[in-house]
Image (cartoon, coloured by chain):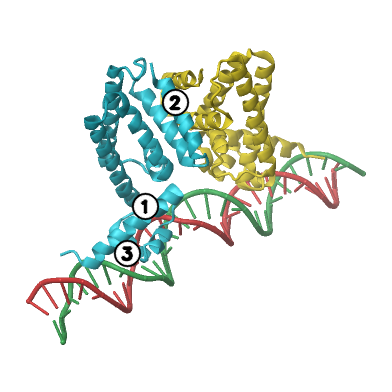
Chain colours: A yellow, B cyan, C red, D green
Amino acid sequence: MIRSDAARNRAKVLEAAEAVLDEHGLSARMDEIAHRAGVGVGTLYRHFATKEALYQAIVTSRVDLLLEQATRLEATAAPETAFFTFFAQIVADAGRKKPLTDALRGAGIDIKAGQTQQQARMRAAIADLLHNAQRAGTVRSDIGLPEVLALLRGASMAAETGDYPAAVLDRSLAVLFDGLKP
Amino acid sequence: MIRSDAARNRAKVLEAAEAVLDEHGLSARMDEIAHRAGVGVGTLYRHFATKEALYQAIVTSRVDLLLEQATRLEATAAPETAFFTFFAQIVADAGRKKPLTDALRGAGIDIKAGQTQQQARMRAAIADLLHNAQRAGTVRSDIGLPEVLALLRGASMAAETGDYPAAVLDRSLAVLFDGLKP
DNA sequence: CTAGAATCGGAATCATGATTCCGCTTGAAG
DNA sequence: CTTCAAGCGGAATCATGATTCCGATTCTAG
């Protein structure tokens, strides 16, 4: 049986880690996470073998959230707008959550087997939305997934650095979107 | 009098540093630079007090090159194209030279007084090219310098990560440029 | 309530890299 | 050709953080 305190601590660690990672990105320190969780480093390591494992756990869950979002959009929203909405969603997320961008970027964390599969699903989701939008005529058809991914990464990274006012980012994204239209 | 061997070594260090930085970006190791320069770390430190000072030296000289380029373009090329040419130039450079992007990004190296002035000049140069292009009607007039800088940074960072084929980057940039047109 | 296993906490240990130190070399002025 | 200050090499030292260890504490089954 899993001890109740252990479960509680695991949750506290996860929460603290998320906060600290959002604040410092990949360079967050383990002892700060432990401290913020009100726990010793030892405890932290009992739950996550390594810093990377901890990141993985958080990033994975966030990407999952995004993937759900994509599925929902594909089912719900008009194909004309779903693509752009999702694109904007990712960029907005990146602005708030550094590690996500770091993960999209692949820097620091070296992506493992399981992770790769998730990445593939993400890529597939974006490809779907893109194709629908192209079929619907809201995205120019002379570009493919690679171009979109490159642009998405650029936009996310710019948003992540975060010293731009929201209005500026919005207008920049609008420019990008105009360029993506036929 | 400056000893001839010292001058020679300084040059070797600079050259090696440039190569290593292009390869590893900000995380380059000092001893690798020293080794590649065929010199001991002590020598390296005799010429540059600190890792940051070494970066500064290289980044500054590169940005200077870019600034010259801007001046030349402004004098020579048509205002319709000068802006886009320079934009592309910076992105291309970023793809080849990590530390440049890092500097534009301001990460790691914390920019010092002298540096800031150079940055200001760069900003001014871009602003000029932008305004000329807007006056000539090749760039939409509902955006300002901040938007352009954000887009430029995003594009540079995407290019820097470097795992995109050149063709993809070219097409992505073309999309961006289309978005920038009126 | 009690024993025993699972968890804790956090000091000690490791690893990685930057920076310092200092005895040895070498260029150049006289 | 000396002299000796400037310059050199690279081992030793520091700093920063991740990871390990182990005695002290809880849980929870019985």
Residue A10, position in %: x, y?
68, 38
| Numbered disc 3: secondary structure | helix
Residue B112, position in %: x, y?
30, 41
Q: Are marks 2 and 3 on the same chain?
A: yes
Cα gap from disc 2 to disc 3, whole angstroms: 46 Å
Between discs 1 and 3, the one toward the N terminus: 1
Q: Quadrant for the N terminus of chain B, please.
A: bottom left
Q: Find residue D6 and report its image quarter.
A: bottom left
Q: Chain of mark 2?
A: B
Residue in view at x 24 percent, y 30 percent:
B74
| Numbered disc 2: secondary structure | helix
Going by the numbered disc 3, the residue's amino acid type is: Thr
According to the picture, the residue beneath numbered tag 2 turns out to be: B176
Q: Which mark is residue A118?
A: none
Res B27 seen here: no
Q: Which mark is residue B18?
A: 1
Q: Residues within 10 Å of mark 2 (few under 14, many from 20)?
A: many
Residue in view at x 60 percent, y 18 percent:
A133
Q: Are marks 1 and 3 on the same chain?
A: yes
> Which dot, 1 or 3, sits closer to the camera?
1
A45 or A134, which lies in front? A134
Going by the numbered disc 2, the residue's amino acid type is: Leu
Residue in view at x 36 percent, y 15 percent:
B142
According to the picture, the residue beneath numbered tag 3 turns out to be: B43
Q: CB atoms at circles 2 and 3 under 8 Å apart?
A: no
Q: Chain of mark 3?
A: B
